Amino acid sequence: MTRRLNAFLFGLLLVSAVCFAVQDAASVPDDEAIRRILVERIDEQKRSVGIVVGVVEPGGRRVVAHGQLATANPTEVDGNTVFEIGSITKAFTAILLADLAGEGVLELQTPVQRLLGPDVTVPTRNGAEITLLHLTTHGSGLPRMPDNFRPADGANPYADYTVAQLYEFLASHELGRDIGEAVEYSNLGTGLLGHALALSQETDYETLVSERLLKPLGMSDTSITLSPSQRERLAIGHSVQLRPVANWDLPTLAGAGALRSTVNDMLTFAEANLGVRESPLREEMAETHRSRRDFSAPGMRIGLGWVIRSGHGRDLHWHNGGTGGYRSFVGFDLESQTGVVVLSNSGDSVDDLGFHLLEQGYRLVLPPAFRSAVEVDPAVFDDYVGRYQLAENVVFTVTRRGDRLFVQLTGQPSFEVFPESETKYFYRVVDAQITFGRSADGAVDHLVLHQNDMDQRADRLTDD
């Protein structure tokens, strides 16, 4: 997928940290400064319900929290509050790969086909095969999501995607570019990697990550299946409008984003990656930190799973995550031995906060400008219902639900859009707008996405 589209996509990961340089680096701000940021973000800007920040420094760790478990539950969040961490799971999957490779069980260059067996067909191109390294560095040529991903429930979109559907997609898909030619962020690719690694060990992903990573690291509060205690401490996810939303389940593509965790556990993970905590996985983690190739955004490279951002004379290893009602960030600087974890129970990105705390040369991003919805006759929505193709395998699906209009991008939840006029609508989950256009005969034949000072046309499909 193009870099332009990456800036819009919701879901498991938005690797498009939009921060800008403003001043020289400093140490991680003190607790009071962090608390002021959280108070402003939650109480004034209304961008989340609860946020927990964890900091690792040479002198130890600290946790700063503000907010509550849910709009309807005033229990305060803290270092033991459970959140979905989404695509940060991909870093765990990469370490699993490094661990198994370190044992000689497999190699980074092992074709994924060998792990899946002869009954599964993985696409090839020009005689080349997709390797495990291609999957974890997003160079496989596989799309972000499979084209047979059609969730029955947009509120929990991955829940009904099956292994059989995954195999069906792989068998029918033709790669659009040479394997390894370019980096294209792929939830599908990392989900396939996690599935294949578990299959090679004759187990499931949750068991594999628990036995080989979580238990050795002492991360007893990180899992996919929640214990009764974890359920009591689970922060409820919220939309950007701070409405409660459902949790996500990823049975088939678990390696792409199924883990839940706490800031205290994620600080343990950061400490192990920094090497300040004794760990049997130290060498394997170091292997994942090594840069492999340029990433698809300026100033970014990718290791095994980890994205590496260069700026202000520092290299920051990081990953973020996003599910329906949660956003997460973990990043660290190997040289200064500092790390930051940010977990939030709303759909508003916390990337800017994570980067800012690690390096004050990256500024906090202001929320989108306020837009007011106007009253329009909901009957006009019927003209817009349909499918609009933005790029190959990327389609906007527009639906009407009563007096409300919703737009869903391929592989993403459905989000409501609000009218500024009869033809122009805006999102509240992101600073983006959509304008519907008509042909000379008056029929709605396209829409235009307005975002990041760009206008991108999507033509209406006629096969509905």
Image (cartoon, helix red, strand yellow):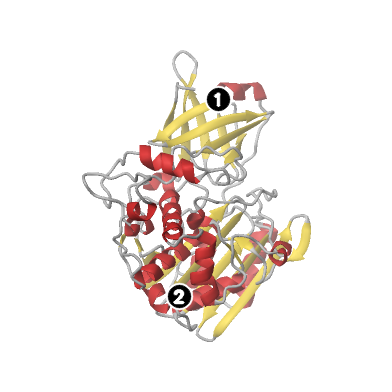
Identify the element where label 1 is drawn.
helix
Front in this rendered view, residue 218 or 276: 218
**Marker disc for residue 273:** 2
Please give the name of the residue rendered at 59% of the width and 67% of the height, measured from the top-left corner: 222
Q: Residue furthest left?
A: 126
Q: Residue furthest bottom?
A: 59
**Marker disc for residue 392:** none
**Residue 110 shows in this picture:** yes
Could you give the CA–CA distance between mark 1 and mark 2, rounded to whole angstroms? Answer: 49 Å
Front in this rendered view, residue 170 or 188: 170
Q: Amino acid at mark 2?
A: Asn
- The percent coordinates of residue 174 (x first, y second) are 32, 38
Crowd rating for badge 2 (residues with CA inside 10 Å; few <14, some 14–19, many 20+): many
Please give the name of the residue rendered at 34% of the width and 48% of the height, measured from the top-left corner: 118
Q: Earlier in the sequence, mark 1 or mark 2?
A: 2
Q: Amino acid at mark 1?
A: Tyr
Q: Reply above or below: 175 against 347.
A: above
- The percent coordinates of residue 326 (x first, y second) are 60, 56
Q: Reply above or below: 108 against 13.
A: below
Identify the element where label 2 is drawn.
helix
In which quadrant of the rendered view does residue 316 lie? bottom left
- The percent coordinates of residue 461 (x first, y second) are 44, 25
